[in-house]
Image (tube, helix red, strand yellow):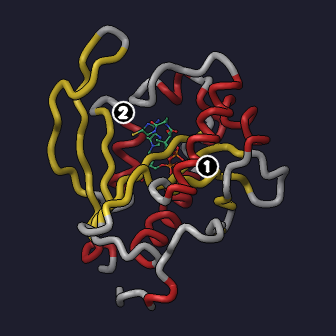
Amino acid sequence: LGEPYLTDLFDFGEFPTLTTKRLILRELALDDAPGVFAIRGDYQVTRYNTGPAYTHVDQARRLIQSIRDGYVRGDELRWGIALKGADQRVIGMAGFNYWHRTDRRASIGYDLARAHWQQGIMSEALRAVIDFGFTRMNLNRIEADCTVENEASTRLLLHLGFQPEGIQREQYFEEGRFWDLRLFALLRREYSR
Ligand SMILES: CC(C)(COP(=O)(O)OP(=O)(O)OC[C@H]1O[C@@H](n2cnc3c(N)ncnc32)[C@H](O)[C@@H]1OP(=O)(O)O)[C@@H](O)C(=O)NCCC(=O)NCCS
């Protein structure tokens, strides 16, 4: 990968919509609250590490507002994932939780409505997100962390070329117990190979 043209470096101006073969990754709007609630209200989606499942659509609205505020502050970039063509209803979310400019590293997070699991959707979405990170954000390192028991997310990260870097033992407390978290990262030089 070459250095990006500096004029092309992402600056949190116009929201960067991305498209892939099957998907549109677009800005989340407050109207997406029912779609986000359908994702975050499902215990199977939230059981690893995103807090308890939502019980009310207002929680989805607050999440969307906080994602939009994070974008305005220039420290959070998260896309809503929709299927091309259809009604463009949001079926998932993916993006960067933070961006450390000096170290040129950022961390990704993602989740997907259960009806769409195991069809290669998140692999396809994250390829576009990662590509954006290495080109438009000029990142050197993309990090992810994942509960050790979360087989789907672990397989997804390995599939995308992320390397496991170790385990933070008993890193967080939820549902009455401590959970181990595995750290992963993908480096720019590995990605370009
Ligand atoms: C993790 C998640 C986003 C995966 O999305 P997905 O679109 O189903 O993943 P893909 O279809 O692109 O699959 C990627 C790889 O993971 C594997 N995989 C996906 N779901 C799996 C499952 N439930 N069990 C085992 N392997 C699984 C696929 O087989 C594929 O592996 P392969 O390359 O070895 O064939 C989805 O399961 C999800 O939203 N989970 C709940 C939220 C979550 O855990 N988020 C991450 C927190 S760290």
Foreground: disc 2 or disc 1: 1
Q: Which one is earlier in the sequence, the residue at label 2 or at label 1?
A: 1
Q: What element carries label 2?
A: loop
- Mark 1 lies within 8 Å of ligand 1 (Cβ measured): no
Q: Nearer the viewer, residue 53 or 58?
A: 58
- Mark 2 lies within 8 Å of ligand 1 (Cβ measured): yes
Q: Tell me if mark 2 has few (under 14), some (14-19) or many (20+) residues whose alpha carbon lies within 10 angstroms of its own.
A: some
Quarter of the image that includes the C terminus? bottom left
Q: Which kind of residue does numbered mark 2 sit on?
A: Asn
Q: Residue at x 63, y 41 (%)?
A: 65
Q: Is 135 situated above or below 44? A: below
Return the x and y of residue 121 as percentages of the image width and height. 58, 52
Q: Which kind of residue does numbered mark 1 sit on?
A: Arg
Question: Which residue corresponds to mark 2?
Answer: 150
Q: In this image, 125 relative to 26: left or right? A: left
Query: Mark 2 to mark 1: distance in Å?
Result: 28 Å
Return the x and y of residue 35 as percentages of the image width and height. 72, 36
Return the x and y of residue 48 as percentages of the image width and height. 40, 28
Q: In this image, 62 relative to 172: left or right? A: right
Q: Residue 109 carries which label?
A: none
Q: Which residue is drawn at 63% across and 33% down?
A: 62
Return the x and y of residue 107 as percentages of the image width and height. 36, 53
Q: Tell me if mark 1 has few (under 14), some (14-19) or many (20+) residues whose alpha carbon lies within 10 angstroms of its own.
A: some
Q: Is 123 situated above or below 101? A: above
